[in-house]
Amino acid sequence: MSALDVAQALWLLVAAIGLALSVSYAGLPVLGAGAFLAVGGYGTALLGPGGADWPLGLAVLASVGLAAVAGWLVALGASRLEGPYLALATWALAWLVQRCLLAYPGRFGGTDGRTAPSPAHLVSPALGLDLTLTPRAHVVVSALVCALLLAALVRLGRGPAGLDLAALREGPDVAESLGVPVASRRRTVLAVTAALCALSGAGSTVLLGLVSPDDVSPLVSLELFVAVLLGGTARWWGPVLGIAVLTALPHVGDALARAGGLDVERSRGVVTALLLVAVVALRGPLTRRLHRPGPPPAEPPAVPGAVPGAVSAGAHPVLLEARGLTVRYAGLTALDDAALELRGGEVHALVGANGSGKSTLLKALAGAIDAGEVRVDGVAVPARVRARVRAGVVRTAQHTALLPHTSPDRQTAVGARVRSDSWAVVRHLLATPTSRARTEQELARQALHDTGLEHLVGADTERVAVGDQRLLQLARAVATGARVLLVDEPAAGMTAQERVRLAAVLRRLAGNGLAVLLVEHDMRLVGDVADRVTVLDVGRVLASGPVEVVRADPAVHRAYLGAGLSDTEVVR
Amino acid sequence: MDVGVLLQVVLSGLAAGAVLGLVALGFTLVAGTVRVLHLAHGDVVVAAVFVGVLGVLGRTPVATRLDLPRSLALVALVLAAGAALAALVGLLAVRPALPDPARGRRGDPLAWVAGGVAAGLLLRAVLGLLLPQEGYAVPDPLRLSGLSHDGLLHLQGGTTLPVRVLGVLALGVLVGIAAERYLERSRLGHALRAMADDPDAALLCGVDVRRVVLVAFVVAGLLAGVAGLLDAPGRAASVDDGVVLGLEGVAAALLGGLGSLRGALLGGLAVGLVQSVAVWAWGATLQDVAPLTLLVVVLALRPQGLRA
């Protein structure tokens, strides 16, 4: 292999690392890397020496910046798209860019492409620099860039960014509910991918002194995608392996071309197609074989029975107040002027028949829908999930939603991410002194302790028992630093013993000063843990107050429990 | 702008749009029932035509006039090839990646995205082996140019239009409406829609889900064959046209609201018009650029479509 070949492979590796960030770390299927390679390659050729005659360094920087903006814009449109639609959009983008390059031969040089002076000279009179960029110089520069990028990738994976990426990849909905700004993280990731692809395009254009539509074609986009898939999920060596295979491929392709009488471009297509199918088909079985199942969770510690709530009305401060909550779906009123007060230190049960609006009320409090004013500590908080989570109001979903391949302690740490600002990732990457403040891991440990789940540390999430799964959702919410927990039917699917543990955990959380709003059908559990209860009926609050008072309310009997039931039956 | 030019732009746009409507109809049918983006659909359109031509002529196509039996054979073969190729794509590339409740298998969207793209690549590569040129003149078994004695339509102010454009427009719209009516009314259409609404419930009601998936692909393939027969003879056809044609169809399907049959036909006409107006205003270089831009913009702004 000549120095030229090595340099070319290394520049391609830069693009693969960038693409891996989107595809194998953030789980975004991007089929349009070629479009960003084109921005870098053509940008450098058009702006740099031989084009608009900007200094080479400036031309490269400008094209990389341009590509980053382009990537961010793509993500701005695509952040709402589900995976397959993102694949479609980026695939269309790859073809659009290709056809644009061919549509304006005057500017882009048609099928021949644009040339740049080769070998290029990096000249800076100010620094007294005059460097001839021989292939050997390219090898040094590109190897340095790759090494830096791989080191950054490893470090990112271990820090807060690793938590964000795991959440983006395995459960964007979970991430959203824990206050991770999913759309904004996706924009950042795609912008970085675009910038690195552009850097790669610029590098190889300067190296070869040429960029043509074939260098940035949709086929190249697919080849890079396959290369990145080869390495599996979130492994720093993935792109390295991918590029190693990709550089070996032309030899296979040539052999195929000779044997089958195909032309070279077509045989590349066949090889890419077969590899794409093979990689995707083998992905599942291979990961199952390579994946060593983690240890099964240890036995949960024995828990003392739940301490019944002692109501001392007015003793606790009001944390959350909501009033005038109204939600209408096409003719159906789900919530009708509902009001609620939640106090720190209390478990507040929300009961009502199916369809009475319990889950809708929870969604409204959590900011998933805008139904009316919600105040936390007397301050109105806008109806957005992230704003509410930051204000300390967190909802856990009715169905079990875990990140299946992230350990219980790590996914609890994802909950703690909302406590740090957006620059925490950068501070961690650069290892600034402030990055050593209290970490997500410590907060996660505390949350697992508070929910009685310390035995899950390091366990395999897929082997966690159903009851512990529900508690784990609670732990993630606690790790956000929540002061108001909105818990939707946590006891569903729990055994009797697990219900006892749940009751104890809820009492302990209230004892820590949290306000817990519990939606529950199990009236025995409600009777065991709740200090107060609110009864919803067809979207309206029927009764609200200490458990005994509501229990005795005849209207509640009629509407919710049916007339004629005796008092004992109501709460049993 | 005089009336002749206006007619020229509008008619050729609508004709191209009627073809795109058929492409979009197949795409939207698969998307609605199987919940899969059929990314090899455009390649099936082009491949069906070339398979038919190679089968009937026995060699690479030239601009010949076919006699009646060979015309009929070509039509039949193109339709059959469309159905067969689509069925192959559905069976080999897509169905293994679909959720299968009966076997407790979860769906794998990345696998069917990759499968569709790979199937398209393979179709292009295999046909490219036999047909290496940039463009081929494909014979027209429907003889739409025979609608007038010189093959042209003379418009006001001396502008002309190939007369086959009118034929393409009429046939495209007719087939589109017929297919839409059939799919809305027939027993098959009901089964397909039951799948679209709720695959699990359809399974419980005795709909053979695995077969319906295949049927959706086959119907899409037949429509692809018709689209190819109308489209390819009008221009220099190349093996590589498929991807962009398919993406134009996707743009049409999305504009009409994915899953809506009538929306796909209307979306096709709209995309055809946009393309034709762009070419008239800014030149033939925008032939592909305009619809692809439209697709990217629709995906970014209103992926649920204009009608939703």
Image: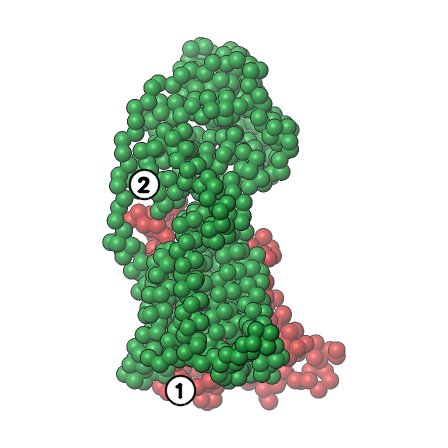
Chain colours: A green, B red
Chain of the residue on which disc 2 is drawn: A
Determine which residue is flagged by label 2: A458
- Residue A159: image location, x then y, percent: 43, 48
Q: For the residues marked 2 and 1, what is the alpha-carbon distance in whole angstroms?
A: 64 Å
What residue appears at the point 30 percent right and 29 percent down from the top-left corner?
A: A300
> Can you tell which mark lies on residue B29?
none
Rendered view: A90 above or below A419: below
Disc 1 marks which amino acid? Thr
Chain of the residue on which disc 1 is drawn: B
Which structural element holds mark 2? loop
Quarter assignment of residue A221: bottom left
Q: Which residue lies most toward the right here?
A: B2
Which structural element holds mark 1? loop
Q: Are marks 2 and 1 in contact (CB under 8 Å)?
A: no
> Can you tell which mark lies on residue B60?
1
Quarter assignment of residue A9: bottom left
- Residue A550: image location, x then y, percent: 52, 14
What residue appears at the point 31 percent right and 79 percent down from the top-left corner?
A: A251
Rendered view: A319 above or below A368: above
Rendered view: B206 above or below A306: below
Q: Nearer the viewer, residue A431 or A507?
A: A431
Mark 1 surroundings within 10 Å by alpha-carbon count, few (fewer than 14), some (14 through 19), many (20 or more): some
The answer to whether residue B297 shows anywhere in this view is yes
Q: Nearer the viewer, residue B271 or A233?
A: A233
What residue appears at the point 62 percent right and 74 percent down from the top-left corner?
A: B276
What residue appears at the point 46 percent right and 76 percent down from the top-left corner?
A: A204
Q: Marks 2 and 1: which is nearer the front?
A: 2
Disc 2 marks which amino acid? Gly
Is the N terminus of chain B in the top left, top right, bottom left or bottom right quadrant? bottom right
